[in-house]
Amino acid sequence: MPTEHARRSARAEAVASQPSNLELRAVFGQNLRLLSTREGSVSAACRALGINRTQFNRYLTGTAFPRPDLLYRICRHYGVDARILLEPLNDTAPPKMSAELARVLHEVIDAPLDFRLDQTLLPSGIYRLWRRSFLLPDRVIMSLARVWRDGLVTRMKSYEPHLISPSQTEITRPAMHPCHGIFLRAEDGITLVTLFPATRMLRFSYFRQGLAGFGALYPGYSVLGRDHADGMVRSGGTVLEFLPPPVTGLMALARSAGYRDAATVPAMFRNHLLNDHPL
């Protein structure tokens, strides 16, 4: 059993071995300088992060630490975590692709081009996404989607059937996989970029608000980013249907997701979804 003197000595040794505030600020300043080289210049880094140049210089010289909200912004922008405050970065490690995309988008999408979506145009909540199947053009896929705001970005998550062969005609319970989307305000509507983490496949969709006088319906079309296969189409009609809260029977709706015969699709949607030239 260690004595009180031994415990005090151990605590004192642990404290003595910790880096000082001055050393920690120096580590952060070096890390931030390394990260800011990705922007091309300190001025570009300040613009990308929305931080005053004078304050940014204090971080670089190790005379100040950022506030928690600014530290969060820096970490998110560069794809790093809060260890940026404590440990030197490995300058040979490649930057995260997401951080590089964020940097480029921030550079090319300047303040006059505001791609944010207002809640009145596309409210957060639960939606049904109806679209023509690319590989079975005589069928429709229905999936349940959640749309929400993540800061300034409007995001979507859904589950859709795995791609199948056009020769498969009997589909009872297809395997589902997750997909993630980002909505952007277009010139006269809404654009959705959907990514499938299990593959490198992308889908691009366009929507306008209002179908047959219903503002909660968003007709549009989707284009699949992949090579052509016999029997498939690479673009098809799509309808985004907002389900006003409270949404009842959510689990039953989720279980009903998958392929639908055209006859089981609501008549209001059918012609648009199966039209060879939607919109």
Image: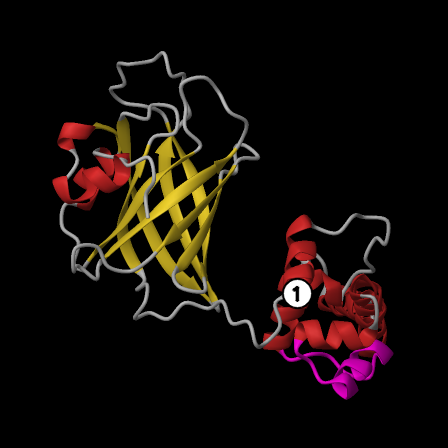
Looking at this view, is 58 or 21 the one in front? Answer: 58
Q: Residue at x 33, y 13 (%)?
A: 168
- In percent of width and height, residue 191 lies at 44, 55
Task: Judge from the rendering whether residue 170 lies leftward or rightward of residue 196; answer left or right.
Answer: left
- In percent of width and height, residue 62 lies at 83, 79
Task: Judge from the rendering whether residue 159 lies leftward or rightward of residue 85; answer left or right.
Answer: left
Task: Judge from the rendering whether residue 112 lies leftward or rightward of residue 96; answer left or right.
Answer: left
Q: Residue at x 48, y 69 (%)?
A: 152
**In which quadrant will I find the N terminus?**
bottom right
Position above or below: 170 against 53: above
Position above or below: 263 against 187: above
Looking at this view, is 254 or 186 the one in front? Answer: 186
Q: Which residues are magenta?
A: 50-67
Quarter location, residue 141:
top left
- In percent of width and height, residue 208 lies at 33, 58
Q: Amino acid at mark 1?
A: Val
The residue singled out by tag 1 in the image is: 108
Verify whether residue 104 appears in magenta.
no
Q: Residue at x 20, y 38 (%)?
A: 270
Q: Tell me if residue 75 can be seen.
A: no
